[in-house]
Amino acid sequence: MDIQLKRGLLDVCVLTAIKNEPSYGYKIIKDLQPYVVLTESTLYTILKRLELGKMLTVRSIEHDGRLRKYYHITKAGLGRIEDFKSEWKEVMSIYRFVEKGGL
Amino acid sequence: MDIQLKRGLLDVCVLTAIKNEPSYGYKIIKDLQPYVVLTESTLYTILKRLELGKMLTVRSIEHDGRLRKYYHITKAGLGRIEDFKSEWKEVMSIYRFVEKGGL
DNA sequence: CATAATACATCGTAACACGAAGTATGCCGT
DNA sequence: ACGGCATACTTCGTGTTACGATGTATTATG
C-alpha cells in the first residue's frame, strides 16, 4: 500500500489496536497485519509519538522473565479516534470527487 | 483537515482537476477549494513532482499578455488515478476496522 | 490610486514511514 | 546440544512531503 495513503491512518490504527485492551508492540503488529502492514521501526516511532502526545500510557510488565511494555489508551487517545471519524466525511467527499472524475 | 490525512490524496486530486480539460495553477486551486484547501506553494510543488513523474505535461500559453502554464494529464497520470481507486478498497477496510472499534 | 485578484516561483523546515542494524531471550527440531 | 526461528524492544539515518514565508509582476476594481 502507498506510504502516503497510510499516513493519517497509522496513528489511529495503533490506537484502535489498544482500545479494547492494553497491548504491546509485537502483538499490535500481528493484530494489525490483516489491515495494515507496518514494521517494528515504524510502530515504535508511532508509539513514542503517541505517548508524547499523551494519547497512551506505558506500563512495563515482566512476562516469562522478559520485559514487555503494555500500552494503555487514554481519554485523549479515544478523542483522537473520534476526531478521525469526524474528518472521514471530508475524506469521502474528496474520494467521491476523484471517483466520479472531477468537475 | 489533518495534513497527514491529505497526503496520498492531493496528487490524485490535482490529476483529477486536469483530467477533463487542461488547467493552470490558480484555477486548480479554486476548483479544488470545495474539496481540499491547498496553498500555492503546495500546489506548485505537487505539479513539479507530477511533471517529473510524467503524470502530466506542461504548455505555456500567452493569455492577456501574461504567461499561463497549462497542465495536461498523460496516460500515466490517468493510470495513477485508477491505481488510487483500486487501493481505496484497502483504505476502506482499514477505516471499517477503526470505525467498529478494533478486535 | 490603493488594494485586491490573478499567476507563478523558491527556500527552508518539521513531520513522518521505513530500512538497516543491534540486543536479548525462549522454544523447537534433529 | 545447538542452530535457527519467533518473540520483543531500540536507535540511527534518510527520503518524501505539505506548508509558511517571501518575492515578482500584471490586471481589475472601488
Image (tube, coloured by chain):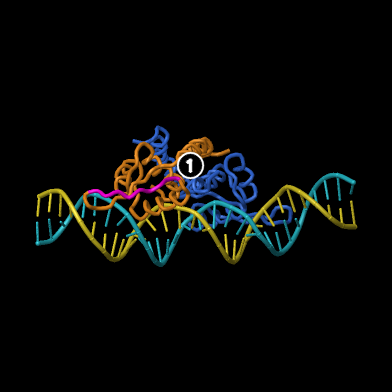
Chain colours: A blue, B orange, C cyan, D yellow
Reply above or below: D21 against B25.
below
Q: Amino acid at mark 1?
A: Ala
Residue holding disc 1: B76
Q: Quadrant of the C terminus of chain B?
A: top right
Residue B64 position in % (x across, y down) = 21, 49
Residue A54 position in % (x across, y down) = 48, 55
Residue toward you, A103 or A24? A103
Is residue B8 rendered to the left or right of residue B38?
Answer: right
Residue B41 position in % (x across, y down) = 35, 55
**SS for dot 1:** helix
Q: Is residue B58 magenta?
A: yes
Reply above or below: D23 against B62.
below
Residue toward you, D22 or A39? D22
Q: Quadrant of residue C24?
A: bottom right
Residue toward you, B17 or B39? B17
User: Magenta: predominant secondary structure element?
Assistant: strand
Task: Please report the residue visible at 41 percent of the width from the left and 42 percent of the height from the top.
Answer: B73
Magenta-highlighted residues = B55-63
Task: Please report the residue visible at 51 percent of the width from the left and 46 percent of the height from the top.
Answer: A6
Task: Please report the residue visible at 57 percent of the width from the left and 55 percent of the height from the top.
Answer: A58
Q: Chain of mark 1?
A: B
Reply above or below: B34 against A40.
above
